[in-house]
Image (cartoon, rainbow, N blue to C red):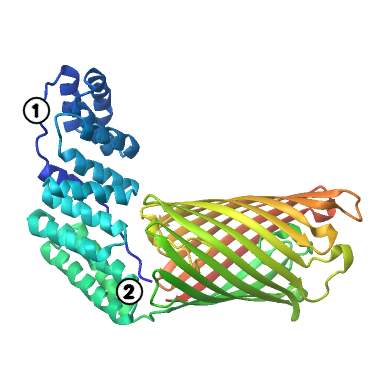
């Protein structure tokens, strides 16, 4: 679906403050208050805090020190403190009507959309800066996904103030864009996107030399391109050349559960996938996925892997900031042309947005593993039921979290998705109950991912994780309980030649430090490849 990018509000809000600011009621001003206000007006916010705090202590029942303290913290982007003092202002005398609007903006910045909306309704009744109130109300309604109501608010702001015409038209375009992304029919999608294009065109016509006009032009070009693209289907295919200094069967991360070959080899790796997303996406949503992985070794052909996965992701929106879903997956793997492993997984998830740049996600998961050929019986039988639980936190750069589809629901085509960068921290608890006593364990894993924009066409993905494996039973051969620490780091550099083609350079290192020497493990993988996307 089409991504929605919010233009930075800094210039707009500053302009609104200058344009619509009204003098607050005159009050007795001591020297500290006068000095604090003077520093604030000169934008020396750190210096203003000391004087304003003294004035606040000297005049705790006066609204003016509290108001300027709130405004100072607001400009310092300390929204928690700004909210505290602006709320105090509203309760003090004499009344400062502007404090209601400023408090609404602070709540918007904190992602407290309902509280911001209630304050804006009060500001409308008091006729506080009507144009600015309407504009901020539109932003809040956008955050609440009440997109068509937001359009009306921006239209009101545009009609009330010529200075807001360009900014309001830009936000109207964003609102229609969001509504089109969640429309229930293709006819509605096309209609809303057409309205969005008209609004962006009006932005350019108003003043083509502004940054906002440049953003609008980018959206127009993307909308034109989108008309030529398939509506529901994305696909990718990648070809990679790799060198592996310790080949294993499993292409995944839990190498502590695979015995190493202690042999190096080069290989070709081919990856690919297909995703189907229906146009109707809200409040009920689902997507379907297919992906494959195939490795062809130069010498160790007995380690060739052919793996295929299918998945279905139904989900439901709970409210403006949260949703629930379930991931249903099945994977079937062949090794050296023989059936090797079948895995079925069900993963209920809960996702919640916190503010505009953070997301937290938790999930429970159950997997059944069925080894299909050459499996050992008795104590070495690795058929298993796997239970796990995880919590994951994301912090996004440059863009709000509303664009991001969390990792358990995503079908990541490449790093050139809809976010410019993010930091991810996760913890996972797991229990693998195997039929054979030698492989049953409890695991605790901590991981981090850091996606860094380097240049316009380049991104770097750094990742690391540590997993502690506490095997439940005494090993029947070595006569002691096995303890492993499996850890790894990787760096993946993406360079985008064009919109549908990436160069990918990978280095990864993984190691297993076990108290049973047989399972000690070090592995380095080097890779270079190309990925083509159709989306």
| Residue 400: image location, x then y, percent | 36, 55
Read off the residue under disc 2. Answer: 183
> Quarter of the image holding residue 94?
top left
> Quarter of the image holding residue 148?
bottom left
How far separated are the C-alphas under marks 2 and 1? 51 Å
| Residue 358: image location, x then y, percent | 43, 51
Give the crowd class for mark 1: few <14, some 14-19, many >=20 residues within 10 Å. Answer: few
Read off the residue under disc 1. Answer: 26
Left or right of 314: which side holds 264? Answer: right
Tell me the SS state at disc 1.
loop
Tell me the SS state at disc 2.
loop
Q: Is residue 350 above or below residue 310?
A: above
* Among the two numbered marks 2 and 1 on one chain, the one whose residue lies closer to the N terminus: 1
Left or right of 310: which side holds 498? Answer: left
> Quarter of the image holding residue 185?
bottom left
Residue that appears at 38% across and 76% down: 280
Q: Which mark is residue 78?
A: none
| Residue 288: image location, x then y, percent | 51, 76
Residue that appears at 65% across and 55% down: 509
Left or right of 146: which side holds 432? Answer: right
Give the crowd class for mark 2: few <14, some 14-19, many >=20 residues within 10 Å. Answer: some
Q: Nearer the viewer, residue 75 or 509?
A: 75
Is any atom of residue 221 visible in this view? yes
Q: Nearer the viewer, residue 368 or 380?
A: 368
The quarter of the image holding the C terminus is bottom left
| Residue 199: image location, x then y, percent | 18, 68
Residue that appears at 41% across and 79% down: 232
Is any atom of residue 39 visible in this view? no
Q: Is residue 395 above or below residue 436?
A: above
């Amino acid at each position: 679906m089409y991504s929605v990018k919010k233009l930075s509000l800094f210039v707009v809000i500053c302009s609104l403050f200058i344009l619509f600011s009204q003098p607050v009621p005159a009050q007795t001003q001591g020297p500290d208050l006068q000095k604090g206000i003077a520093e604030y007006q000169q934008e020396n916010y750190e210096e203003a805090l000391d004087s304003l705090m003294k004035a606040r202590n000297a005049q705790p029942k006066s609204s003016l020190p509290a108001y300027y303290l709130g405004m100072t913290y607001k400009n310092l982007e300390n929204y928690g403190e700004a909210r505290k003092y602006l709320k105090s202002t509203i309760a003090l005398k004499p009344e400062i009507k502007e404090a209601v609007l400023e408090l609404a903006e602070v709540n918007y910045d904190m992602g407290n959309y309902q509280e911001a909306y209630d304050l804006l309704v009060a500001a409308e009744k008091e006729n506080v800066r009507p144009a600015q109130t309407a504009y901020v109300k539109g932003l809040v309604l956008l955050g609440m996904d009440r997109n068509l109501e937001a359009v009306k608010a921006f239209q009101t702001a545009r009609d009330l103030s010529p200075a807001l015409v360009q900014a309001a038209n830009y936000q109207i375009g964003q609102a229609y864009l969001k509504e089109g992304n969640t429309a229930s029919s293709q006819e509605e999608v096309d209609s809303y996107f057409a309205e969005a294009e008209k609004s962006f065109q009006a932005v350019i016509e108003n003043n083509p030399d502004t940054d906002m006009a440049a953003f609008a032009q980018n959206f127009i070009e993307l909308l034109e391109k989108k008309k030529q693209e398939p509506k529901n289907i994305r696909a990718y295919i990648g070809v990679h050349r790799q060198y592996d200094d310790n080949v294993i069967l499993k292409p995944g991360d839990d190498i502590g559960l695979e015995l190493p070959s202690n042999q190096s080899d080069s290989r070709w790796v081919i990856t690919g996938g297909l995703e189907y997303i229906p146009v109707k996406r809200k409040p009920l949503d689902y997507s379907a996925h297919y992906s494959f992985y195939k490795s062809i070794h130069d010498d160790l052909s007995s380690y060739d892997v052919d793996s295929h996965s299918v998945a279905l992701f139904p989900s439901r929106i709970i409210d403006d900031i949260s949703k629930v879903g379930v991931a249903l997956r099945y994977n079937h793997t062949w090794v050296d042309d023989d059936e090797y492993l079948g895995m079925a997984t069900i993963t209920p998830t809960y996702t919640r947005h916190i503010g505009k740049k953070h997301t937290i996600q938790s999930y429970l998961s159950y997997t059944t593993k069925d080894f299909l050929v050459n499996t050992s019986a008795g104590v070495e039988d690795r058929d298993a039921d796997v239970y796990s639980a995880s919590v994951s936190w994301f912090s996004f750069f440059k863009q709000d979290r509303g664009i991001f589809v969390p990792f358990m629901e995503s079908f990541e085509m490449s790093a050139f998705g809809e976010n410019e960068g993010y930091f991810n921290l996760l913890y996972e608890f797991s229990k693998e109950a195997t039929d054979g006593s030698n492989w049953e364990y409890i695991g605790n894993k901590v991981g981090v991912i850091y996606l860094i924009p380097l240049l316009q066409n380049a991104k770097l993905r750094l990742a690391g994780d540590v997993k502690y494996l506490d095997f439940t039973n005494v090993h029947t051969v070595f006569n002691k309980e096995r303890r492993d620490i499996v850890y790894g780091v990787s760096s993946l550099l993406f360079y985008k030649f064009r919109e549908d083609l990436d160069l990918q350079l990978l280095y990864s290192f993984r190691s297993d430090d076990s108290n049973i020497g047989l399972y000690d493990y070090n592995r380095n993988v080097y890779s270079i490849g190309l990925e083509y996307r159709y989306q």
